[in-house]
Amino acid sequence: MSFLYPVFLVGALAVAIPILLHLLRRETDVRVPFSAVRFLRHAPVEVAHRRRLRELILLALRVSALALLALAFARPFLSRGIAAGTSPLTVVAIDTSYSLTAPGQFERARQLARRAIDEAPASHLVSLIAFDDDARVVAMPEARASVLAKLAGVRPGYGRTRYRAALSRAAEIFGLRGGKLVVVTDLQQVGWDGGDTVTFGPGVEVEVADVGPPSGNLAITAFRLEEGRPAVSIRNLGLLLRTGQVRLEVDGRQLAEMPFTIGPGTSATLNFALSLPATGTARATIEDGNGYAADNVRYLVLDPPRARAILAITGSNPRGDAFYLERALQVDETSRFRVELVAASAVARLDPAALRKFASIFLLGSQGLDLRGAEHLAGFVKSGGGLMIAAGARLDQVLVQALFGALRFDGAWEGRTAPVSLVPANVHHPILRPFGPLTGTLSNVQFRQTAALPEHDRWQVIARFSNGKPALVESTLGEGRILLFASDLSNRGNDFPLHPGFVPLIHEAARYLGAVHEHPSELVPAEVPAGMKREPGIIELPADARDRRGGAAMGSEGRRVAVNVDINESEVSRLDAGQFAAAITRSSVSAKDAARTEARQIEEQQNLWRYGLMLMIVALAAELVVGRAAA
């Protein structure tokens, strides 16, 4: 137990007052001579030991009340380990990214880490951190012999360097302690992301143990199909001319080799004159005896991408409401969209988990959509889904406003005597960017009926009507996106579905909305779902696979994905010690001030002084009762 204001404990000396009074009030019985004791027979008699016991009880209650009052003013609290670890500490953070896999590099890193542990002062405990994309505590503060044993088991992996992860974890371990942090790394420049800073207390010294760069590095930076034929890009990150062979394998069988010659600091792409199978897996490899081993191989899944599932919610006329949307998404087989129709009245009966299989949802009509179904849609968007709402005559604006809150329609669906056209407002938006110089063709669309959309900071205007009113706006809800279109998509209030720009706009909207739920065909090791190996190769994702950060489902059962190292880690550009130190800030709060603040917060949460006052009141009440009984 600790005290926020221990000076008040001096008040506990007041317990001496009732003790002193008790001692002073002790009286000696006066001897009275009597001729005969028969005259005392009817006199009241009090047993002496009972009187002494009562006086002792009263004394104890008075002493307890004064002591409890002093304790209450001292504000006691259970420290829960505050300042338990105040002894200085040495933390060693060793880089285990794949940029330490060049010949001899990690052995050098291990030697520097061992030296830092050996040189730690005798009064220091030692902790060990291994870091790449994440920081893992290999050894909590303990004796150096144990830490050295654990250092022997540390190996480099396939992640990229992230200094922020290592320093943040080290700051947590230091807490209120002082000491020394030694970062053993190759000072790779890509390890600092823009804006990264970490704050340490004034009592922590930070030192960098530089492993040094490799003598050179040759890396496969890309492996892809170009017009159905394999293409391999290689980069020479060294200072010398490099030659070698690229080997191409499919399903474990070598198909071809191709020689290359690449100058220092340059790249080259090798195109193989052969076609690969429609399904299977491929691997491209090179030999590099000087650089990082992990970037000498790259994998590719040849399986065709699976179709994106699109859900179209319609009103009372399913085929009429979704006819043009369905045809637009199926016009080109290479786009690979699969459209499912459902009546608005049936949305409430859908399992919310079943909605996750859809890349995006188009709300074309709301007749029959009840509040429960609307909540299913809101949950889909909040979890990262994409929703496009066509604000046509068949849309219940009141229900949609109740569903999404921020959607505010300034007016009802209205017809126009003079049609308006479509004018792009943000040509750089992902939906309009593919149009390039052809965005002007959207002005040929004639809108006869429109809805008034919100003009608000929360809504980004993508396109307007020729009268200046918003035509297509975007907002967010939770982790998902909402597109709101001020007309229908069924050729009722406009002739948009009859124009060439309709199909590419719908395609880009579907891709953009489904980007969060898009199934990747390639991952880096840090993105591999939990429970699976974080190393290059081909993996098969289970149905409920999610990324390590708890994101959306990554695909359906049986889907193969290539895992390749992050090619940014292949860079050999380095920081200097000054640049590294610039990202470390110092707290102006001393360890003593931080401990005092933490103690005050804990005391305010526990409020033990209240219980002390309550016990004091109980003691005083008991003293009053016992005192009256003695009177």
Image: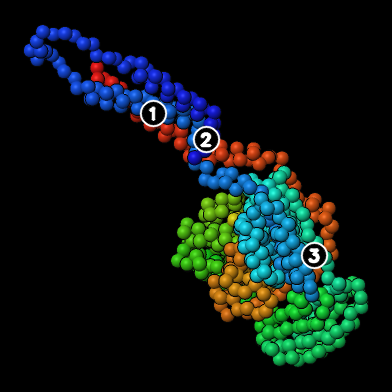
Side of 513 where 190 appears, left or right: right
Q: Residue at x 76, y 63 (%)?
A: 112
Which residue: 39% across, 31% down? 614
Q: CA distance from mark 2 to mark 3?
A: 48 Å
The nearer-to-camera label among 3 and 1 is 1
x, y (%) of residue 97? 72, 67
**To which residue does mark 2 refer?**
3
Of residues 562 and 292, the one drawn nearer to the viewer in this rendering: 292
Residue 290 horizontal side relative to residue 178, left or right? right
Label 3 sits on a secondary structure element that is loop
The label shown at residue 64 is 1
Q: Give the residue pinned by disc 3.
A: 211
Circle 3: residue type: Val
Q: Is residue 287 visible?
A: yes
Q: Quadrant of the C terminus?
A: top left
Q: Nearer the viewer, residue 381 or 540?
A: 540
